[in-house]
Image (cartoon, rainbow, N blue to C red):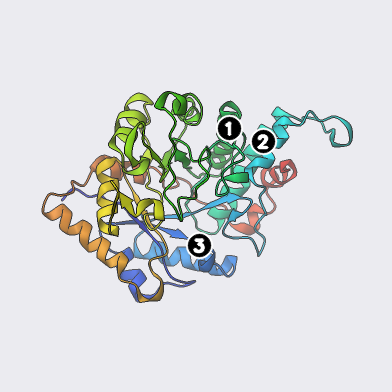
Amino acid sequence: MTEHTPLILDVAGTTLTADDRRRLAHPLAGGVILFARNWESRAQLLELTAAIKAVRSDLLICVDHEGGRVQRFRTDGFTHLPPMRALGQLWDDDGQGARARQGAGAMRATNAATAAGYVLGSELRACGVDFSFTPVLDLDYGESGVIGDRSFHRDPRVVALLAKSLMHGLLQAGMAHCGKHFPGHGFVQADSHTDIPVDRRSLKAILADDAAPYPWLSSTLASVMPAHVIYPKVDARPAGFSRRWLQEILRGQLRFDGAIFSDDLSMEGARRIDGQPVGYTDAALAALDAGCDLVLLCNQSLGGSRVLDEVLEGLEAAAADGRWQPSADSESRRLALLPETLPQPWDELMLQPAYMAALDCLP
């Protein structure tokens, strides 16, 4: 079987259990996604990430750490990062009156976005975290509660430039990134965590507006996460399960060649395909078949659940009987997301001039 480790799974607590270690050692496990429940302190997080790497050094340790309300680690010295909308508001601010400040407006916003990326990435890396699912490229229509202030702006040009600036800061910290949620989650009101959103616009309208940042950033994006949203004028399946969206449009038309992550397969938007309810293994196989390189399955390690074991066993069986073909290209894309440099220890980071300057740039 071609080596391919597609499953990003979760762990239950602040230390690894025997079940966690067994799953992480499985040849189809590619990484871990951490949550606030996995956090007590910086020292504890560093011990947890070291324990994960001791199981397998190539496991990708991930987190949703965007800033604003989506920031898993908030205490023991972690900087409270602003929501991305604050950077968009800086862009719009002409710097007049009481808010006047040298470099205000668009240039200050791009500097602040780079600073946010650098602070975000360097603090996480100092605690052993490899990768964050950021930035959000969805547009801010003012309608989506789940996206809301996680979006930079309504204008896709502003979104692309601020996202590129944030990605530059992450790169300075030695961290890759993930643009989400392709082709756009901001237009629909429904939350794909609890519902199956439907966006009835045409492909032309979506590509001209919501999806516009993706080709503009195609030479920069390291990875992309598709939305659990159905765009019926393009495909009856949610984007993350759609060969048309992922292979024909994202890879073919928009020429993206980085890694594609599914969004969390435990979300309601992933629990029904072609109008039919599906199990976790079938959802994982559908996402991989559509063109995802990696699949996320979150919050399934709790309460003695066997879901993660069932999916690992199901993927193994599917590969053995030919229902799924592991991909060496997908594995190469996963490995490319791992940091290539050593992280800076926290105490040294706190005294680094570039880090202190970045803090001063944050809104």
Residue 119 picture location, percent across and down: 63, 47
Count the labels in the image.
3
Crowdedness near tag 2: few (<14), some (14–19) or many (≥20) residues, C-alpha within 10 Å: many
Report the residue that reaches farthest toward the left: 321
Residue 183 picture location, percent across and down: 44, 35
Name the element at disc 2. helix
Whether residues under marks 2 and 3 lie with C-beta atoms below 8 angstroms apart, the answer is no
Name the element at disc 3. loop
Residue 332 to residue 345: above or below? above
Residue 318 falls left or right of residue 21: left
Q: Earlier in the sequence, mark 2 or mark 3?
A: 3
Residue 159: numbered disc: 1
Task: Say which of 193 and 150 sits in front.
Answer: 193
Whether residues under marks 1 and 2 lie with C-beta atoms below 8 angstroms apart, the answer is yes
Q: In which quarter of the image is the C terminus?
A: top right
Q: Residue 5: in sight, yes or no?
A: no
Task: Say which of 274 and 140 sits in front.
Answer: 274
Q: Residue 224: in sight, yes or no?
A: yes
Question: Which mark is nearer the camera, 2 or 3?
Answer: 2
Q: Mark 2 points at which residue?
A: 88
Whether residues under marks 1 and 3 lie with C-beta atoms below 8 angstroms apart, the answer is no
Q: Earlier in the sequence, mark 1 or mark 2?
A: 2
Q: Distance between the residues labelled 2 and 3?
A: 27 Å
Residue 35: numbered disc: 3
Q: Which residue is drawn at 43% across and 70% down?
A: 12
Crowdedness near tag 1: few (<14), some (14–19) or many (≥20) residues, C-alpha within 10 Å: many
Query: Which residue type does callout 2 highlight?
Result: Gly
